[in-house]
Amino acid sequence: MSDAPPPAAPPGPSAARGCLMALGFIGGVLLLTAGAGALWRHRAQEAAQQAQAARAEAEYDPARAAMRKAARGEVADAPPVVDLDKTVRIVHELDGALRTEGDMGAYLQQLARHDYRGVDPGVLAARKQLMDVLVELYKTRAEADEQAELWGLSSQLLLSALSVVKVQGDYNGIVPTGSVKLDAQQAKALLADLQQRQEARLVLGREERDLEGELIEALVAYSTVYHDTLEAWDRLCTVRDRAYLAARAGDWAAAEAAARQAITLAPTEREAHLLLALALIEGGDLEDDAEIDALLSQSMERYPQSSAPALLLRGVHHARRGRSREALLDLEQSAAYYPRQAEVLADLLDPYAARSYLQLTAEGSGVLELYRATMLGAGWFSPDLQIADLYLQQGRKDEALRKVLDHFHRRRGQGQFDAVLADIDAAQVMLGDDLAAVFPEGGWLDLEAKPTLIGDALSVTLHNRSSRTLHNATLVMALQLTDMHPQDYKGLRAGDTVPAVNARDRTGFGDVPVDFTVNGVKKGVDQIVSTRAVLVSDEAVVWVDTEAFRLAEAAEGRRRAREAGAPLSAPAQAAVQATTRAGRLQVEPKLMGDAVRIDLPAELAALRPVFRLRRGDAVLTAETNLLHDDHIELTFTGLRGLAEGGAADLELIASTAVGELVITFAGQGLDLRVDKVELR
């Protein structure tokens, strides 16, 4: 008999029903839970989208209000005529913000901060229409990654807006023989391409499909209006550039005519009014006085935040009419305002960033140079240099030279080192020999700039061979790079300001990185064609060059002097006479070859000479070349046979900008005097 338990009975119908009910209950609970989760997620997503929509509205509302008011002409004191320059500048700034702002919200804040007075209402209305659609799409993006994708697409879309414009034929803006067409299909292709690049589809549903259609329509509308504005601005720039070029060439009648034509095209623009005033001032006609005063007063009233150039022109006008007191007051006020208004005036340069083609020609570079000078108070437009010129006319030479130094210290304080180059050129034209006389030792400052072993930089040292120490010294490098015009230089500061450039010593200014872009191409040390520098110190402002550059500069100066046929300046004549009177040569016999010491009067330093000693076919460079307080000391070594009377065969060549001075010696024994100085 088995002890195993009997088999269990199969479950009855009631037990099976109980299991099914339990399973059904669990399934119902799970289904209910899933439904509740889906409902919760739906409501959470809905809440997030509502919050995003509210946030987008709040972010956009200030910008929308500002643009809507300006587009409808509701801004107080809005000028009755469109300011084309400001329109292009504002769009340029907004496009710049598209590149720098990290999200839509930050960009909308940028939109709200701008002053849209004077901006073309049509451009504003079209831009607002485009932004309206983008913000509607922005409202639907609750997730951060979706917002980032939309911002990337939106910014690229706005920056590419004008790519939907098709130009057929020759459409040059002045005599258009072609036509302009806005292509909706091209707009669709642009949008599709940008979507693909973002690796996310913008359109997800029917509502967004409708928005995509609105986006394309808004893009085409904005491109149409803005293209027309750019075409009008291009016409204005063409005639205004003509005025700049004429002014730079000193053709004041042509400058006046072109400026008047530009004013006709854009009655509220700024530059042509200043150019017209400049042309009338330089033209010198007394009958123009009332118009000059009206032009400059109107400019200061219309643009009080950038009045420094107009004040400078009025000061020059007073000076030309002999009103010294009024001239000085206006020029001093202009000098005070240029630093204060520097940010506004620099901002006015922005539209020229869209005209980079000007850098491709010498003429275009001339336009940019004069415009920058006007906006930054550089060169002829420097108030301090104009005050210095006024002082010179009054015989106050010391005060004039102090004012020149004041100007360069102001420029250094503002950090506008690229303007230093134009400043020193203008100072040399205005002050001529008087500026050179401040520090005649300039020819004894040697620039040593060598590529560093590591990195794209120059190791810069200044060798002071004079007897004067220069204090509080800043060195501004002037580099000419490949593809630049021969007269153009890029300016950059070399290291920090040093306490002193000591006499008879080398002063290091550290390593200077060279990283420029010329016509869209990056340039480094290997692309340097020529290297110069300007030294700004408490005692003087002076060009500093290599010896090779000084030789080339002297040759060019001689060429210009021959073409002009001008007589020697008073300092040059004084230098020649002093050399003839006081120059001497001494021979010191040595076993390995005789040494020669030549002493020349200090007056010769003003000509910045480069010395060579010639004996027959041999040409020697000075081993020692020092400038003392009252004389120049040169030594040459390795010569033979001089102690036996061969020194009379020597010729000292002094290469200068006025010509080559050939100095010969005569006498007995080891001590000779200058026999004659010939200019060749």
Image (cartoon, rainbow, N blue to C red):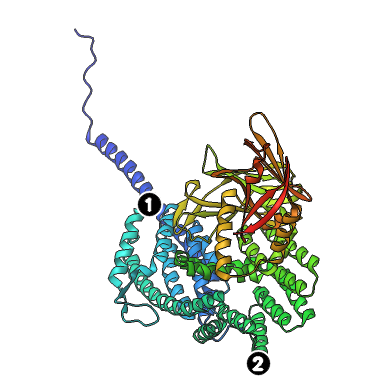
Q: Which residue is mark 2?
A: 287
Foreground residue among 492 and 508: 508
Q: Is residue 80 above or below residue 242?
A: below
Query: Callout 1: 10 Å neighbours few (<14), some, many (20+)?
Result: few
At a point 60% along the width and 49% down the height, the residue shown is: 547
Residue 449 in which image quadrant: top right
At a point 39% along the width and 79% down the height, the residue shown is: 173
What mark, if any, has residue 158 been given in the picture? Answer: none
282 relative position to 500: left or right: left
Q: Which quadrant: the C terminus?
A: bottom right
- Where residue 541 sits in the image (x, y, percent)? 70, 57
Foreground residue among 13 and 240: 240
Q: Which residue is mark 1?
A: 38
Tell me the SS state at disc 2: helix
Do we see residue 268 in this rendering? yes
Q: Name the kind of residue labelled 2 in the image.
A: Glu
